[in-house]
Image: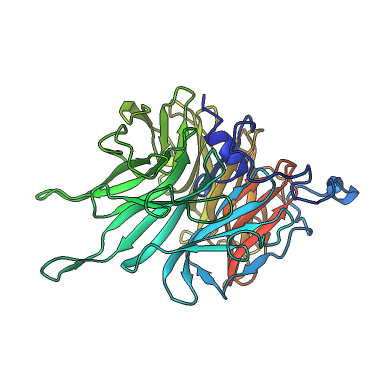
Amino acid sequence: MFDVRDVGARARYGSLLCVLIAPAALAACAMPIEPVDQAGEVGDEPVVASTDELSAAPGSLDPSFGALCLDTSARFTVAGAVRAQLLPDGKLLAAANVIATDTGASELALVRFLASGAVDTSFGSAGYVRTSFGDDTVYVSLEGLALAPDGKIVLAGSRDFIVVDAAGARSQPTVIIAARFTSNGALDPSFGTGGKAQAAVFGKTDRAAALLVQPDGKVLIGGQARLNIPGYTPKHVTALVRFNGNGTLDAGFGQGGIVTTDGASVRALGLEANGNILAASPALQRFSPAGAPIGAAFAGTLASVSTANFTSFALQTDGKRVVGGSVRSLTNKHARIPTVSRVSVAGASEFVTPGFNYGSPITGSTAVLQALLVQPSGRIIVGGSAPLTNDENGFGLAAVLPNGTLDASFGGPQGLFTRIGASSAVTALVQQADGKLIALGYCENGIGRARYFGS
């Protein structure tokens, strides 16, 4: 079983990349950031569900939750998937890699929302935080957002930067990065250098794809690295990097804080109760707390579907893993539509859903799956983009029952879609304590967000 103090509880409050795991318990998750009353915000009256809320159909929009698209263009343009983290006080964090409007630099950004969906102006600068990684940076990507046990905010991703050698030759390596912030959005000077840390696995193309903050505060990042050996064809390998709570590489993990094995990029991370690490990709690998591989990798995913692409992964608290991806549309061989698979701990396929399109009115077109959330009941909520016209995409959501069938009570037989401007997509999902679901992603001019009634 997993240690719900870390992965399970943390995922109830937010995301693991764009993949989520619902917990069996909440009590040992991150400590509250600030004292709040039972309504979730200082000074609010206790919230009582209205008759309309009690009768709302599952999957219907909650009109009380702010505007659908937060226009961030005065500050930045969203340049990657938006990650999300629900906080213990009911507030919501969103993070993404962005292009700064004033400088054109590639940066990481955080935004905090109140439980009402409004921007929390007490966070950072009027609700926003932007962080750069040096003038030599070409591009930064964000791949993970999580809370440390003490409530601090941790981001993980990758950084491309320019190196000029003594002969004047230029190269552009990629390294894995992490940053930690206080609960109010200030960079934490006790982590790394000024709140930031980085690690080079092989120093060529090292990319993060999953983040887990352990109960002891250590920061574990999974991804892949490119191995170049003279005389051999370059290849990508599975990579794990672990930082201590102070941002230094953990010398007690692998070789100087780094572990590499044959395999694909890690897309989700979990902890077993004994401290063993589970790393999910198209296979599932187990590592000791010190980073030593344990046994052979478990097989089985959507591999039985020859046309499948994998995009999202989640580890359940029972060790099973859920894989989201896409398959070719039966009505258009050039289009792809989402599908979901669940795989046992032993690697056996338990189900593969038929393809679905979120109820899109455009048949035969491509729909995308980019986020997964496994609810305590075992139902799986997925999100992505749904084609609304030949030129427009909107938020798409669907629910998959524990037996692998689509839940027609959630929106409809194929799911549901929400129009948010001309182009938008879900890239993160979180579930509130009251069962409502919040979908976040990008929209035409910034961050898209919508709250839906649950089951």
Q: Is residue 169 above or below residue 216?
A: below
Q: Nearer the viewer, residue 189 or 285?
A: 189
- Residue extending farthest right: 51
Q: Is residue 305 left or right of residue 261?
A: right
- x, y (%) of residue 408? 71, 45
Name the residue rendered at 31%, 54% in the picture. Answer: 175
- Residue extending farthest front: 189
Picture quadrant of residue 258: top left
Q: Is residue 443 above or below residue 283?
A: below
Q: Is residue 80 above or below residue 19?
A: below
Q: Is residue 188 left or right of residue 434?
A: left
- x, y (%) of residue 293? 31, 29
Name the residue rendered at 52%, 41% in the picture. Answer: 148
Name the residue rendered at 80%, 51% in the picture. Answer: 43
Q: Nearer the viewer, residue 320 or 272?
A: 272
How is colour applied across the structure in the image?
A: rainbow
Q: Can residue 444 be seen by looking at this rendering?
A: no
Q: Can residue 126 be seen by looking at this rendering?
A: yes
Quarter of the image containing the C terminus?
top right
Q: How many marks?
A: 0
- x, y (%) of residue 203? 24, 52
